[in-house]
Image (spheres, coloured by chain):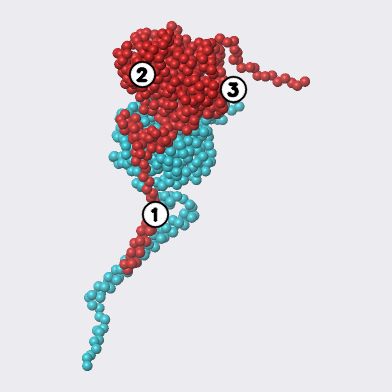
Chain colours: A cyan, B red
Amino acid sequence: MTTPDIESPSVPTPTGAKEEQEDERKRRLLLLILLFLLLVCCCVAFLFVRYLAKPQPLPQLLPVPVGNYPPAYKFSVIGVDGPVGVAASPDNQRFYVTESRGQRLIKMFDRSGNLIGSFSPPNTTPSNRQPVYVAVDATGRVFVVDRTNNAIDLFDANGNFLDGIIAPNMTITKFLATQIPGGAPIGTKFSWDGINHLVTYQMPDQASHTVKFNMPNTPWSPMGIRFDPKGDLIYTDITTNLHSVHIIPAASISGSWMTFAPTIQEFGAEGKGTGQFQFPNNALTDSKGNFYVSDGDNARIQAFGPNFAYTTFFGFGTGDDGLNLPRGMWMDSKDHLHVVDAVGSVIRVYDVSGSVPQFLFNFGMPGTDAGEFNYPIDICIDGTGRLYIADRDNDRVQIWSY
Amino acid sequence: MKKLLFALVIGLMLVAALTTTALADNGPHGGAAFASGSTDACASCHRAHTAQDATGDLLKVSSIYGLCTSCHDGTGAYTDVVDGHFDTSAPAIYPWTLSPVTGEGDPGAPLFAGGFTNTEMSHTWSGSAYYSNFTYTSGPVTSGHNVDGATSGTVWGAGSYSATDTRSVAGIFTGSTVGTQTLTLDCTSCHDPHGYAGKDNTGKSIPSYRLLRYQPTGSNGFELSAAALSTGGQTSALFTAANSGSLDQVAGAAGGATVLEPTGMGANAADGYKATSWWYTINSDWTLDPLVAALKLPHGWVAGQPWESITNGLGDYGPNGRGQEYVRPAFNASVVNTAKGYYCYDPTAASLVANPPFATTTGTYATYTGNCATFLTTNPETGTAFDNSKARVALGLFCAQCHDRYFEASGSASKATGDAVFMYQHASGAATGSDPSITCVDCHVSHGSSASMDSLAQSASLTSLAGGSNFSGVDSDLLKLDNRSMCATCHGPGINFQFTPPAAATQVPLP
């Protein structure tokens, strides 16, 4: 008779302890993973609840840094006739569009694309005004270049005409101060006829007067306008043989226009060489104060230092990064330069944050469908990462977003 | 455990995916330097495989007008053809500032050809002081050449006008026996976007004035003869841009007349001029080589129009011996008679200034002082008098390649032309001898006019016979001024015609 094997009582052996330790480790790991997932779910839930409470674009809830990837098409705003210029308000709640056809108005829309108003320089008709580029300063004032009248018109945020720069150192109100002792009183209506160089004004309860303004023999043919972060107004000028970039100090823009006397800095000349331009349509700065000029007819972007010294050019030639006809531009918060290629009907984006500009990507393509362009002209990006693109021959403004 | 971990990993991936948005959108390949001066520039407008137009030109865009006005809307060129505005900043490199219709073509003034959407014009005529009427108003175009590339328009004054009159110049709109000719135009019908549509005195291609072609697309050229009308026996050769380089192909025509002289051949071999270049590049010295001695119009031969040249250029494409020049047409040739000196339009003075200071440097652009663009009257090379009136006649030839039945010589107002419809006509450029002549561009613009017409003027328009124009329906026929003010600018002073606006009517109380 054999004695059945009787297992020895469970006595922890070195091997069993090891397995237990392993199991413990796995349990802890699992617990950590579960805790992590719980945290993520809580964050998502928090954002969701917050969104429900106050719907905002995702970047405002959770700022999404503009990355090196193209934006996404969102929707289009129609009801604009040949849009060429676009600018957003500093509170990101409205945007302004200039028309090159039809009534040639400056139209303003809310963030959803609803038309909330339109305006134009006083005493003008669609035949004798040509609003092109537009810019909005930090206080919400709207600056519009009128090519027919050779003026930079100033409107308040609601489109009320305030004044106009009609020569490098002259505004309408400053000129009126030479005609009206003490300057134009409050309530005076005035307008500018840049074709015939006439200022028409009417003081309250008085007859209208028209006075000739003798244009000074100084270059004055504004084209593109932008504001730099300091509030300086940067405009390009296409006076023959003097295609150049000009900077009006912020203090002159924000001060009294009746005593407008800015010290305007400038650089550039007309031509195809280094530092020369042919119909520069736009100029702006990056975060370091470097200048970039949309050198239209030379099909390139030229870069200059803060001291206006030429540094480099890019976007010239064939290839994905080659520009056909650069027009409007915008610099985003990552120093990514967005250039509208009008003939290419595409937006080309370059990273200029480094010492050498790098092509990043294009977005859009020629066509009439959603997300396609037909001679786009201008672009702006608001503080929420939303892009507005004036899609001229599609008669719409396209809204994209990062 | 492994399954759980795998599920967790997947889950994490999904969670991560919620926080990212990305849409790839690769733009089209392509892009090229504009005006790079090399073949690289071809790619700015053309695509070999992805062209979007139906013209056969392999354009990357579907709208030629859209492409051209990407710059010629004032944002990329001084010639704003949308609004008919010559940019304010452009200097007076076209110093021949003489037009009674408000100095058109001057910097900051209306573009000479007008615009396609708006045109700046002077809509009033102030009697004998019309030179001083320099107040411009801009208005929507009421008539013009429709260049949208899609709309077919009637070519007035061309081809067989009716079933009973089928005559037409050989080669120009032949084949039609009923009704009028039609054409669909775009910018490139008249302008060569490549820019080298002219020829210099060596036959080398050079820019022509405003990039105008030898002949508009759709026309078939002119018949010209080198034999003067007075000698008789004209034998014509169809002269087109195609054969302008090898006219010897049509040489030796019967009748003893020498047809147009090709480069390096003929009696004046050293000249080497090409006749087509004279239509707007003004490259001939008539005294040396009377190439265009006669023109064949629908009803017969008329004498050709000589014109003079200035070498070592002043003008559009000025210096460095290009040798061609466009002199902006004067409205009234007699005013530019060299004996009367030269005149200057001072935009700040709103009146003509006689004998202004003038400075020039041979081989460079003419310069001017102050606001006064000067008017050249003397060939700086030879010192001979220069009559700029000839140049505009060249434009008349250009227009008449389509509108050939309008093209008549001086004296045609009282001498029957033989044309059953256009029997008696105002001279329009087919002038005789050395007489300057009025021509198309003296009264009409080529892009668009904003002139307004009242009922009588409208009904008198030829276009009204066939249903109106392509624009607003106001048959302004591309005239430069309202109603018939163009007539009055020349004939007004000779006619006892009061232009004083009638006094405001006095309200008469009812009995």
Q: Nearer the viewer, mark 2 or mark 3?
A: 2
**B315 to A353, vertically: above or below:** above
Residue B364 appearing in the image: no
Task: Name which residue lies at 49% across and 20% down.
Answer: B167
| Chain of the residue on which disc 3 is drawn | B
- Specify whether disc 2 shares its chain with disc 3: yes
Q: Position of residue A344 (x, y in %)?
A: 38, 37
- The tag earlier along the polypeptide, 1 or 3, is 1
Task: Name which residue lies at 42% across and 10% down.
Answer: B232
Q: Quadrant of residue A233?
A: top left
| Distance (Cα) linking label 2 and label 3 | 45 Å
Question: Pointer 2: residues within 10 angstroms few (<14), some, or many (20+)?
Answer: some
Amino acid type at image mark 1: Thr
Q: Which residue is mark 1?
A: B19
Q: Which residue is mark 2?
A: B250
- The tag earlier along the polypeptide, 2 or 1, is 1
Amino acid type at image mark 2: Val
| Lateral position of residue B158 relative to residue B48, left or right | right
Q: Position of residue A176 (x, y in %)?
A: 51, 25
Q: Nearer the viewer, mark 2 or mark 1?
A: 2
**B344 to A60, vertically: above or below:** above
Which residue occupies the extreme bottom position in the image? A1
